[in-house]
């Protein structure tokens, strides 16, 4: 067993926020599985989305050691494209349809496809986190418009959990960031400071309030990514999504989630086993958890009691055990 310090969550005001846009009149549709099936009739919503029997990993075994070494030295790695183009196109069209229906993109997580694709990089996750790794359902779907005012999350460290680097230098918790469109300097690609070029990185492992202003500008690394690329980093790498531009040819669309080792204590209040049953109500709860976790300010400022009640009620579906216990699904 690997020892780790469990949740020492930062104050919610220090977590980067995204705006919430959801008309309260759409709430009945949000809770109706038939609505979602009609919206994207070519996609499935089943109870078992982790169906990987027909999925072959596109990550060559020879690359795994390289990724592990880079993760230890620089705190991150980036794969080549791993998800088939046809699948990526389905994911993109799904998100576009969800937006056109008036919902935040995060509600696309009701569909199986966003979980099925984990099979394409299961080999690298197993190499890093071991067998039995688990999802921490802190998802977000990013849709960065082609506007000079659009941007990704502000410069930050994820730092929701302290001391998640093992004695072997490997992280026990990692962020997965999956590109659905090209991410370019014009439409907001990721930028980060490699761990070995960041003088505050070591301190951040133990102090979740550590900032990131002491690095040299020339040590910033841009990470343009083609569609279906997987980016991974640990909890302490300083990173951000850059500002977009009206000159960008298309929006930047991607999504992210955390994973943790399965042989350590849970670092959060809810974990998802892989594979596991993940029914529609659980998917809806995951979307509402994301909204509540990453959009608390805009949620409270909406002054829509029906909307707040909808988010809280569905989010609570993930937390039906006493708060003192960690729940696994």
Image (cartoon, rainbow, N blue to C red):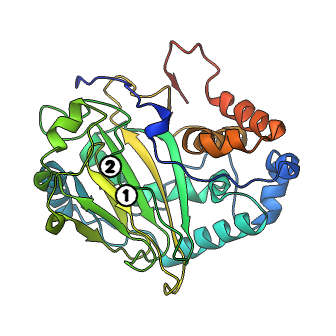
Q: Position of residue 319 (x, y in %)?
A: 61, 24
Q: Which residue is mark 2?
A: 125
Which numbered disc covers residue 121? 1
**Can you say whether 329 is above or below 250 in the image?**
above
Left or right of residue 123, residue 227 in this image: right
Q: Position of residue 21 (x, y in %)?
A: 71, 55
Q: Give me the residue at 87% from left, 46% from top.
A: 28
Left or right of residue 181, residue 90 in this image: right
Near-viewer residue (256 or 124): 256
Near-viewer residue (302 or 94): 302
Mark 2 secondary-structure assignment: helix
Near-viewer residue (199 or 252): 199
Near-viewer residue (228 or 157): 157
State which quadrant residue 289 falls in. Answer: top right
Which numbered disc covers residue 67? none
Q: Distance of mark 2 from mark 1, alpha carbons?
A: 6 Å
Q: Position of residue 106 (x, y in %)?
A: 62, 54
Mark 2 surroundings: few (<14), some (14-19) or many (≥20) residues within 10 A: many
Q: Quadrant of the C terminus?
A: top right
Q: Give me the residue at 44% from left, 74% from top.
A: 227
Please say if the residues under marks 2 and 1 sit with CB atoms less than 8 Å apart: yes
Left or right of residue 284, residue 49 in this image: left
């Amino acid at each position: 067993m690997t020892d780790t310090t469990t949740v020492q969550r930062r104050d919610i005001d220090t977590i980067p926020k995204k705006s919430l846009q959801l008309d309260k009149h759409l709430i009945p549709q949000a809770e109706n599985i038939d609505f979602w099936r009609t919206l994207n009739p070519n996609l499935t919503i089943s109870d078992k989305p982790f169906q990987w029997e027909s999925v072959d990993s596109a990550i060559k075994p020879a690359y795994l050691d390289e990724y592990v070494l880079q993760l230890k030295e620089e705190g991150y790695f980036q794969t080549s494209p791993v998800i088939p183009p046809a699948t990526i196109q389905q994911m993109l069209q799904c998100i576009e349809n969800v937006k056109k229906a008036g919902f935040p993109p995060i509600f696309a997580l009701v569909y199986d496809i966003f979980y099925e694709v984990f099979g394409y990089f299961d080999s690298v996750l197993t190499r890093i986190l071991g067998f039995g790794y688990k999802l921490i359902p802190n998802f977000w779907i990013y849709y960065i418009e082609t506007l000079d005012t659009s941007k990704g999350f502000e410069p930050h460290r994820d730092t929701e959990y302290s001391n998640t680097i093992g004695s072997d230098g490997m992280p026990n918790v990692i962020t997965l960031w999956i590109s659905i469109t090209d991410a370019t300097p014009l439409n907001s690609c990721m930028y980060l400071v490699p761990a070995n070029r960041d003088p505050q990185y070591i301190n951040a492992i133990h102090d979740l309030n550590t900032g990131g202003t002491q690095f040299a500008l020339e040590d910033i690394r841009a990470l343009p990514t083609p569609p279906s690329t997987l980016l991974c980093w640990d909890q302490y790498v300083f990173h951000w999504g850059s500002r977009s531009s009206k000159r960008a040819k298309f929006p930047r669309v991607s999504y992210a989630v955390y994973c943790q080792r399965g042989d350590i204590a849970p670092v959060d209040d809810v974990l998802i086993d892989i594979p596991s049953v993940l029914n529609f109500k659980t998917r809806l709860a995951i979307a509402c958890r994301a909204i509540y976790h990453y959009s608390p300010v805009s949620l409270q400022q909406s002054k829509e009691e029906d909307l707040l009640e909808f988010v809280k009620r569905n989010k609570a579906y993930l937390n039906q055990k006493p708060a003192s216990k960690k729940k696994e699904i």
